Image (cartoon, rainbow, N blue to C red):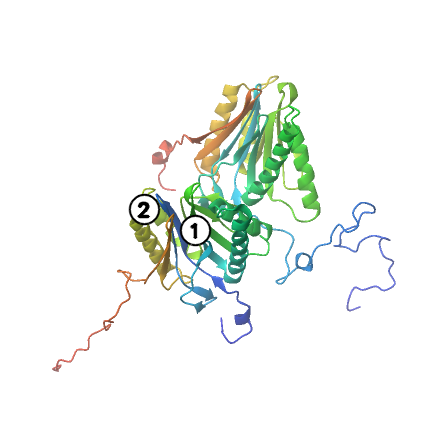
Amino acid sequence: MLNNYNGLAQPFWQNGPAPGQFYHFTGGQQQIQNLPRELTTAGPYGTQRNTARITTGSSVLGIRFDGGVMIAADTMVSYGSLSRYQSIDRVFKINEKILLGGGDDFADIQSIKRTIDQKMIADQCRADEIEMKPTELAMWLTRVLYNRRTRMNPLFIDVVVGGVNAEGKPFLGNVDLRGRFYEDFVVATGFARHLAIPLVRESKPAGREFTAEEASNLIRKCMEVLYYRDTRNTSKYTVGVCTPSGSVVEGPYKVDENWSFASTIKGY
Amino acid sequence: MSYFCREYHDIPVSTGTTIMALEYAHGVVLGADSRTSAGSYVANRASDKLTEVADRIYCCRSGSAADTQAVADLVSHSLNYHQYQFGRPPTVWEAACDFRHLCYTYRNNLLAGIIVAGYDDKKGGQVYSIPLGGMLVREPCTIGGSGSSYIFGYVHDQYRPDFSKEQCVAFIRKCIQLAIHHDGSSGGVIRIAIITADGVERRVYFNTETGQPVTKHKKLTELDTSEESD
């Protein structure tokens, strides 16, 4: 046969979408995907659903210690390989109990931050003296990001959410563009995931949390390593610290660089 | 690439461009080249890429000419109504947010890199950069467009935050001249806009040493009319 069409074959399933189409769940909204044709037509006169990452932030590193969490990120947003914006804070104070470190596409980070800010205002308006907790924000983010991913229109972000929950219990988690959530004493995005996480895990004392001093020394060390080994980095970084007494974003600090060994290398 | 084959019509008309804006003590200074290219062809050699969106707010446009003109028209319309609704002129931040709203929401469909610059009574002169993708950030000195790649080093080295108005103008002229020198998609004249509380001043400089047009052309080689002996 010249083509693979088999007119006698049974369809694989009944009442379901053709391959590549979205399934319309019964009940709920009648028209979930009532999008204009510009958004559903692929090609030069329509659009493909996926955006590309354009202006991106690099690594974000979070470390949990006995009194709270620290989240650090360098102050740069790149445009491909161009180091475009070199003085941008990528660690945000959300409220007294939550810090957010934003990595990957920065326009999407700014967008989700605007939505989160509105959420915080609504939280204040309830006037119930209860502030939103980091776990709650992280879980909400997973729902938003998973929903966008399912509609094939993701927010290209990789965020570290950290802070203190009720009774001062520290929380540190990482949510990515697909809505995947991970909680641990050290989380990171970008290059830090490869370079900083093993470094911090090796230094973890058995049976207890880090102290604040250990955590901040590790942050300093990791920022130094990332500056040496990540091409999309700058030597300036900010650090957010959240403890039961509140949250604050400090910096910018500068990496302590060591190049003295370079003069000993000759030849290749 | 032939101009006579079908591909020619499909090449998007873009403002392959150099644009720039600086904040200074009393306001902002904006600058741009004047070349609109469609691939290798110069569609408009004297275009104006400094577009007014409100009395004291301008934008510099780079990217697809159609996209940036459409976006600027929409924002200008929105800001025009703003005065009726709020009883005061729009702030530069509000204009920048309007641009960002369009550039971010339609980021898949647009090719627009925009610099918003202007003066308002709240914060004085401000410059906001909205690159592809639709993020928004304020920068006291910012450059954009295809020609900007060639002058990042120069700007980083020579920019001072305490320029006077004429120093700003001279700096922008120099930067755009250097960019035009190396970028094929930038050329023509250098347009400048100076925005302060007192209003908007527009200037045009030719791409020459003095900024004035060259009136008398020197021959490349002078003819040697002396007798040659064998």
Res. B78 in view: yes
Res. A183 in view: no
Residue at 53% over, 62% down:
B66
The type of residue carrying mark 1 is Arg
Front one among A131 and A262: A131
Q: Is residue B98 left or right of residue A173?
A: left
Q: Please identify the residue farthest to the top as the structure is shown.
A: A207
- Residue B230: x, y in percent? 13, 82
- Residue A214: x, y in percent? 51, 21
Badge 1: chain ID? B
Residue at 45% over, 32% down:
A224
Residue tagged by mark 2? B158
Front one among A130 and A170: A130
Q: Earlier in the sequence, mark 2 or mark 1?
A: 1
SS at mark 2 in the image = helix
- Residue A28: x, y in percent? 80, 45
Front one among A6 and A69: A69
Q: Is residue B50 above or below residue B85?
A: below
Residue tagged by mark 1? B56
Q: Is residue B225 left or right of residue B115?
A: left
- Residue B82: x, y in percent? 53, 50
Name the front one of labels 2 and 1: 1
